[in-house]
Image: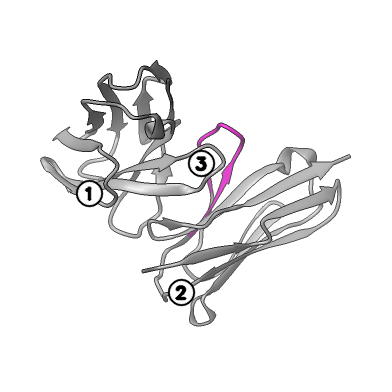
Amino acid sequence: GQQVQQSPTSLVLQEGENAELQCNFSTSLNSMQWFYQRPGGSLISVFYNPSGTKQSGRLTSTTVIKERRSSLHISSSQITDSGTYLCALGLTFGLGTRVSVFP
Amino acid sequence: AQTIHQWPVAEIKAVGSPLSLGCTIKGKSSPNLYWYWQATGGTLQQLFYSITVGQVESVVQLNLSASRPKDDQFILSTEKLLLSHSGFYLCAWSLWNYAEQFFGPGTRLTVL
C-alpha cells in the first residue's frame, strides 16, 4: 500500500533558527498536503501543494512528484511554531515531525 | 464559507457502552466525508469515507460503523465500546477524492 514517511521525527530549535521537514512517499499521487497540529488539537491545513512551491509568510512548501518528496521549510522559527507537522498524500498520513522552539 | 462541526467535544464512556459521534458540514453541497482516528501520540488512521448520502466505505475495521443519513451529516457509532477505542476522532471533508481536506475540531473519547 501507499506509504508516507516523515523526517526527522522531532526537531528542537532555538527561536530564530530555520528548519526543513521532509516527507517522502511511495506513489506519485498528485495530492500532497501539510498540516499543523497542537497537542490535543485538530489539524490545520498549512499547505495543499500537489506540486511546485508555495509560500505563506515564513513557511514554504516544495513538492517534487517525480522524486516522490515534499518539504516544509520554516524560516526564523518562533515559539508559536511549536507543534506537530503532518504530511498527507491523499488519505494516508505520515507519523509527523514534532517541532519544539525555545527562546 | 464552509464550516464543519463535531459533537460532542469530549466523551468519557464505560467499556461496553454505546457511542455516537456526529459531524456536520455547512456551506458545501455533496462533499466527500471522512472519519479519522488518532490514538494518543499516534498518527491519523482513516476509518471511513463517504462520497454520497447513504453510501459509506470502511477502510479499517475497529468494531465501529458509520452512516451518512443526510448530505451534510456523518455519524460514527458502535454498540459496544472497547478500551482500544479511546483517542481523538476527526471528521474531514473534501470536494473530491485526493482534493484538499478540511478537518473539524475533533472529539476526544476516553473509554474506561
What is the three-letter code of the residue carrying label 1?
Ser
Looking at the picture, how far across and down is residue B38, in whole percent? Answer: 46, 41
Specify the quadrant of the image occupied by residue B35. top left
Quadrant of the frame with the C terminus of chain A: top right
Q: Earlier in the sequence, mark 3 or mark 2?
A: 2
Element at label 3: strand
To which residue does mark 3 refer?
A: A43
Chain part drawn in magenta? A33-45
Q: Nearer the viewer, residue B101 or B39?
A: B39
Give the CA distance from mark 3 to mark 2.
23 Å
- Neighbourhood count class around disc 2 (C-alpha, 10 Å): few under 14, some 14–19, many 20 upward: some
Specify the quadrant of the image occupied by residue B10. top left
Outermost residue toward the left in this view: B54
Q: Residue at x 42, y 75 (%)?
A: A27
Looking at the picture, how far across and down is residue B88, in whole percent? Answer: 45, 33
* Residue B62: in magenta span: no
To which residue does mark 1 refer?
A: B58
Which chain does the residue under circle 1 lie in? B
Work out whether A94 lies above or below B30: below
A44 lies left or right of B60: right
**What is the magenta segment's predominant secondary structure?**
strand
Q: How many marks?
A: 3
* Residue A36: in magenta span: yes
Residue A26 disc label: 2
Outermost residue toward the bottom in this view: A66
